[in-house]
Image (cartoon, helix red, strand yellow):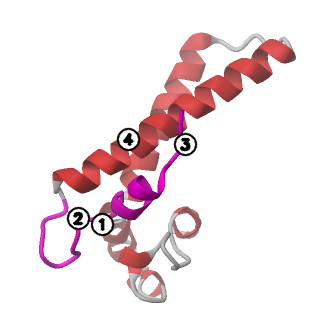
Amino acid sequence: MRATSAHCSSLKASPGGSATAQCHTHPAGWTANLGHVTTYSLTLAVALAVVGWRFQLGYAPGWVAAGLALNAVTHAWADRRAPLRALAVAIGKKSYWDEVPGGAWHAGRGGTVNRGQCHIL
């Protein structure tokens, strides 16, 4: 099991290899993103199961599943960057988003924005 790989990390925000040449729904970026989110979610589920078993926490399975599903959906949405940037523009934070060295498409690959910026929005 992998929570992410170099391949997924390099493609998950990509609209398909070039920020300007291809659309934001290109399958390579979505496939990498969903692979990352799936393995990350499975890692979380295993960690929750181990901690819950070890400390006899008695999680409610339905609530755990709902939390993991919500986390997966919002994680995949934010990792694609374009929807997150659209939110930043919509709420008047475009200049903040654009302060990322090299632009937002480089976030996670030397830039400083991603979930940290999502939390500030």
Query: Which sits earlier in the primary sequence, circle 4 or circle 3?
Result: 3
Point out residue 89 in the picture as x, y percentages from the top left corner.
Answer: 34, 76
Measure the alpha-carbon separation of dots 2 and 4. 15 Å
> Residue 2 in magenta?
yes
Residue under numbered circle 3 = 3
- Residue sitting at 57 percent across and 69 percent down? 120
Query: Which sits earlier in the primary sequence, circle 2 or circle 1?
Result: 2
Measure the alpha-carbon separation of dots 3 and 2. 21 Å
Residue under numbered circle 4 = 35
- Residue sitting at 59 percent across and 21 percent down? 64
Mark number displayed over residue 20: none
In the rendered structure, are the residues bearing label 2 and label 4 in contact, judged by CB atoms less than 8 Å apart?
Answer: no
Discs 3/2, front: 3
Point out residue 94 in the picture as x, y percentages from the top left corner.
Answer: 38, 82
**Quick one: quadrant of the N terminus?**
top right
- Note whether 40 is above or below 52 in the view shown: below
Query: Which sits earlier in the primary sequence, circle 1 or circle 3?
Result: 3
- Residue sitting at 52 percent across and 34 percent down? 41
Residue under numbered circle 1 = 82
Query: Which sits earlier in the primary sequence, circle 1 or circle 4?
Result: 4
Discs 1/4, front: 4
Highlighted range, magenta: 1-24
